[in-house]
Image (cartoon, rainbow, N blue to C red):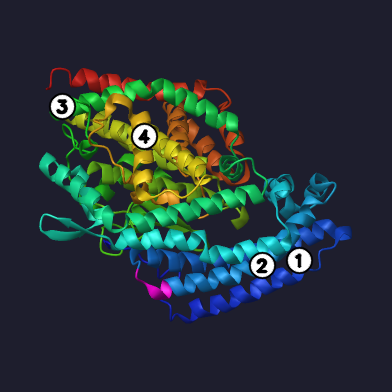
Amino acid sequence: MNSEWSLKELYSGYDDPEFLADIGRLEECVAEYIRMAGELNRDQAAQSIHNQILASDAVTELFYKLHSFCSLNESVNSADKQAADYLEKIIKILQEQTKAAVTFEKFVADVDDLEGVIASDELLSEYAYLLMRIKEGAAHNLSEETEEAVSKLSLSGASSWEKQRSYLTSMLKVDYNGEELTLSAVRNLAYDKNQAVRKAAYEAELLSYAKVRDAAAFSLNNIKQQTLTMAKLRRYESPLEKTLWQSRMKQDTLTSMFTAMKEYFPKFWQYLRRKGELLGHKNGLPWYDLFAPIGGSSRHFSAEQARDYLVSVFSGFAEDLALMVKRAFDEAWIDFYPRKGKQGGAFCADLYCVGQSRILTNFDGTLSDVVTLAHELGHAYHNKQISGNRIGNTDYPMPVAETASTFNENVVMDAAIAAASKEERIGLIESQLQDVTQIICDIYSRYLFESAVISRKAEGFMFADELDQMMLDAQKEAYGNGLDTEYLHPSMWICKQHYYFAGLDFYNFPYAFGGLFARGLYAKYQEEGEAFLPEYRALLKATGTCSVEDAAAMAGIDLSKPDFFRKSLKSYADRVDEFLKLTEGMR
């Protein structure tokens, strides 16, 4: 089994004649798109929109194939100059159509009876949701000339600052125990069974950020300045309103979720304090022990063992998922291990053009790493469900993007817990609570921090020391008395790439939503069994063509009130109570 992914399904290399030909074809498709935008005819609205959509689909499919190949190469080798050069080239080609795209969107927005026009054409009917959103979002569009300028300037704006931070952290050398390790490798030591190792790694990690903290501060400041500028130019009341529009989510849904989360924070703090006590701490859990293995959760997996375990577990849930998981391992969809120049964390990329996905992890063999694999394979399963959609209907919003991934986590963890002995059960429940606490407490701390950064950026520049303090303030509020405030993580704003995504702000609350939404769906599966699976697949497929609220409604869920979120949180709170009972007296 390969330890690194294969990209040959896209291209054999930068010198592949097909790769170079596709760059030429992309230029031709963009030129055709621009030409057609200049010939839009209001008297033949349906046909004009039909033709423009076909042209757009051709551009999109070619662009994503080329972009995926280059960006995936760059993600495992930040020093890949060819990847960086070609990414810049193909993005510039795509940006040539910006003005024409705005022309098309204005044309669509100005169609009086758009619903009637959509109903008259089969292709337009498939794109009904997308077209109606274009009309609804017209108020936030800029002029054709301004949109074109913004698109071109983005290459030297937020996108460049994002790349700087990614490059610096991927190349960062951490001095640990007399040797130099990558940042990802050192962070993986947080899962080591030896507390001395965990603490030393935590201290080494914090010290290492001194090498990049000032540069990261400039990156974050400039990215968030662009965030504020673009929100104002596009006539949004705030960057959060812009993100909610992009997320196809209502403010009421976000408010309901946070209301329920805040009610349950003390329960998660109880779990953290108990874990701290088990590890010999009296003032709450120190950050360096957040991911410490407890009980039987220290089991180590090889990549092959992880494959066999996941295939076995998912076979009891959905056979099509189990088969996809086996295929992902056997056909080199996954890049497993940390190495110099490789991006930290984990992600899943949809390769629509070949009907596959690619998954990056920094696998170290812990149960948490196996759950991470299950999580990313959930994204791949989501991609599989929408692969039958036209490419313009495959772009689902951030909140539901975490649905299948977190659902997978529930399947894996609950299956493992049900089959475990008492000692193993303690470890598995603790591992599940560890992950859930991340999507509840830690995600809320990230939301608080990013909100504070955007608010403070409106007043001036934030140096690294100030950002450290803002991070600490957010962690104290979200984690309460669950953590030892002497050992928090002030540099988490450098570590987490989500703050640096150009044009994509508040990439934090979707994780909490995904976790709670998936838990609620999982409860329905437990009640309904196999009868739930067709509904689940249909919901995932529909996420590209509806709002978050409409997707939830397909499963009979009302997101406008906290009740649904409370029910999901209650199931996790029951796990906390079980953990407290099982560990009573285990000082």
Which stretch did the figure color magenta?
79-83
Q: Is residue 463 above or below residue 95?
A: above
Question: Callout 4: helix, strand or loop?
Answer: helix
Image coordinates of residue 424 in percent, x first then y, are: 18, 31
Asked which quadrant contains residue 253, the reply is top right
Q: Residue 483 location, x and y as percent?
A: 26, 30
Along the polypeptide, which appears first: circle 4 or circle 3?
Answer: 3
Q: What is the x, y in percent for residue 284?
A: 22, 27
The residue tagged 2 is 97
Would you name the residue on which mark 4 appears?
A: 473
Query: At 17% across and 61% down in the image, what residue appears?
Result: 180
Q: Quadrant of the N terminus?
A: bottom left
Q: Earlier in the sequence, mark 4 or mark 1?
A: 1
The amino acid beneath tag 3 is Leu
**Mostly what secondary structure, the magenta segment?**
helix
Few, some or many residues within 10 Å of mark 3 (<14, 14–19, 20+)? some
Query: In the rendered structure, which amino acid carries the disc numbered 4?
Result: Asp
For mark 1, what is the residue? 37
Kind of residue sitting beneath label 1: Ala
Q: Nearer the viewer, residue 411 or 14?
A: 14
Side of 162 where 179 appears, left or right: left
Quadrant position of the C terminus in the picture: top left
Q: Amino acid at mark 2?
A: Gln
C-alpha distance separating marks 4 and 1 = 50 Å
Q: Tell me how far mark 4 sits from mark 2, CA to CA.
A: 44 Å
Q: Is residue 442 left or right of residue 114?
A: left
Q: Is residue 585 left or right of residue 444?
A: left
Q: Are marks 4 and 1 in contact (CB under 8 Å)?
A: no
Q: Callout 1: helix, strand or loop?
A: helix
* Mark 4, other Cα within 10 Å: few <14 / some 14–19 / many ≥20: some
If you read the primary sequence from the N terminus, does the residue marked by circle 4 or circle 2 appear first?
2
